[in-house]
Amino acid sequence: MADIVLDKVTKRFPDGTVAVHELDLEIADGEFVILVGPSGCGKSTTLNMIAGLEEISSGELRIAGERVNDKEPRERDIAMVFQSYALYPNMTVRENMAFPLRLAKLDRASIDQKVDEAAKVLELTALLDRKPANLSGGQRQRVAMGRAIVRSPKAFLMDEPLSNLDAKLRVQMRTVVSRLQKRLGTTTVYVTHDQTEAMTLGDRVVIMRGGAVQQVGPPQELYDHPANLFVAGFIGSPSMNFLQAAVVDGRLRTALGELPLGDRVRRELEAENAPRELIMGIRPEHFEDAELVEEGTRANGVEFEAPVDIVESMGSDKYVYFTVEGERATAAELDELAADSGADDLSAMGSNLVTRLSAESSVTEGESRRVWFNLDKIHLFDPANGRNLTLHEGRSTGALTA
Amino acid sequence: MAAADTTARAKWRWGLLDVVVIVFALVPVLWIASLSFKTTATLTDGNFVPREWTLDNYRTIFSTDQFVRALGNSIGIALISTAVAVVLGTMAAYAIARLDFPGKKLLVGISLLIAMFPQVSLVSPLFQIERSLGLFDTWPGLILPYITFALPLAIYTLSAFFRQIPWDLEKAAKMDGATQGQAFRRVIAPLAAPGVFTTAILVFIFCWNDFLFAISLTSTEQSRTVPVALSFFTGASQFEDPTGAISAAAVVITIPIILFVLFFQRRIVSGLTSGAVKG
């Protein structure tokens, strides 16, 4: 087990493209860190550089305090689980798992013992004599994990290990991975493009975009205090609503009405030298049916009325889509997020507001409904550079009314 | 019912077509075999099944030093050429499939160009070159041109096979602690085996069947191969046709090819890489 330090690590490909730019990251011993971002953000390249499968163009990579830039993968003593599983098809499950141990020239007895142990942990004992071709996707995935854990490496690297599984199995395997990592306590770097995996698995999440780190932190912190538009839009499902907003006479003019700007927020905006045109972000769960808001909390927010477009009942709560007037917010970050999710061609469908209301709400499609939302929870972003302007002041974000 | 009818009829139609193809392909072979068992008297009686069976023709060819020597030459030259071409081809194909180096496309293009070059136009220059180098009428004198013309074929077939092997496997092997050599030997090579055997068969057949180079670059029994030796067969007298002996020899030289293919065919298991990666 060991810590992993990336010090200004850069990857420049021969054709000149920079996949990763001066990445700084310290991964503590035993920590479970997730690298997440849209495709092409450099997360897999970063992982491959840690693995030693990609050369590092500049910067330094240290594992357990030792510079390993020029070391071969086999000298780094780290195991990797591939998205494709990469099982050796000509070997049985047992031989697959024993392969790293045989290369390490362990004696037969201890190889057998270690393989049996790992197989037991991953419930593969009954499958040890099968070939990978005769296994299901989930079983292959477990074999790939087994091959990684048998030799107790310094660290695990996982490159989207669950993305080839179907949805249900993925949720199951997520808990398996999580439990395994807790039990072994091995430093783990996990790459995914799925923000749900990022939120549920990691101790810390690293959000990447275009080869640079956007924000690093525990999942909840990224969710509550996104550093910029990109992080705000990437984390959360359904994602945060973004609306155009303008500061006029000390108030915030938005499609949801004119909102009061608290003293603190005004001070923050002044300190940041904020432009008058802003982007307001608010998460779906910070809305509530105006009829169901408790009196004590009502004062923290404001109400507006809008026509209901679609109601999706989830049982535990309702996703309600409202049509709101006004232009949708535009920024480079948001366009990129839309392009990544494949929704960029849906923008013609107009401005939609996603809200998560309590299941007791009697909202129906087609009607016009009064909705309340929490002013404490709104974020204001600079459209030019995407920065969150409401991040400071003891990290309590909005506090517009303060 | 209608659907069942059409499938039954389709089966019949395909079956019939298969039989026609097989008969078309095998009749000449059977005919040669039949001729080889006929006596000189019944050779031209036009019967498909010989009326009088004899092994005289086989005895004749094996009693002459000419044929036995040629058979030895053929086997030796074809095996050596195949081995060298496959080993060199494997290395080249692996590099082409895995590495990105400047001039890669040019290299592949040129090697293909060699394969397309009309061999007959190279015979005279090769003849001159080999005579001045002292390679004329030697084993290397045939092995070298065979390798030259077999290599493009080998490189092309093998690189297609290597491309099918997921690169992740090699990365996985490296992560598991293998050196480049171990990764190749223990993971990639076993998976490439079907490709290597297929290529070996193709190259072997090419070398075995060649007549043009063999007749132009040899002059004595020292290095003459079977196809050439056959053409030098003569009857007992000037007026006797050596048809029977030639037929017997033709049957005999087909046998190594059949053995070679049967031996390696069992190793050409399709879908050997299945299960390595998703899907």
Image (tube, coloured by chain):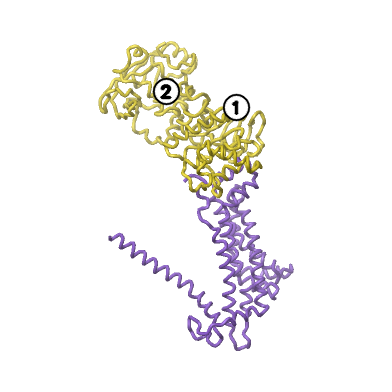
**Quarter in which the N terminus of chain B is drawn:** bottom left
Farthest-out residue, left: A367
Vertical position of residue B79 compared to residue A198: above or below? below
Can residue A5 be seen here? no
Residue occupied by mark 1: A29
Within 10 Å of the Cα at label 2, are there few (<14), some (14-19), or many (20+) other Cα atoms? many
Vertical position of residue A378 compared to residue B105: above or below? above
Residue occupied by mark 2: A279
Q: Position of residue B43 (x, y in %)?
A: 53, 85
Within 10 Å of the Cα at label 1, are there few (<14), some (14-19), or many (20+) other Cα atoms? some
Badge 1 sits on which subunit? A
Residue occupying image coordinates x 70% and y 73%: B222
Residue type for callout 2: Ile
Q: Colour of chain A?
A: yellow
Q: Position of residue A201 (x, y in %)?
A: 49, 29
Residue occupying image coordinates x 58% and y 68%: B257
Badge 2 sits on which subunit? A
Residue occupying image coordinates x 53% and y 47%: A129
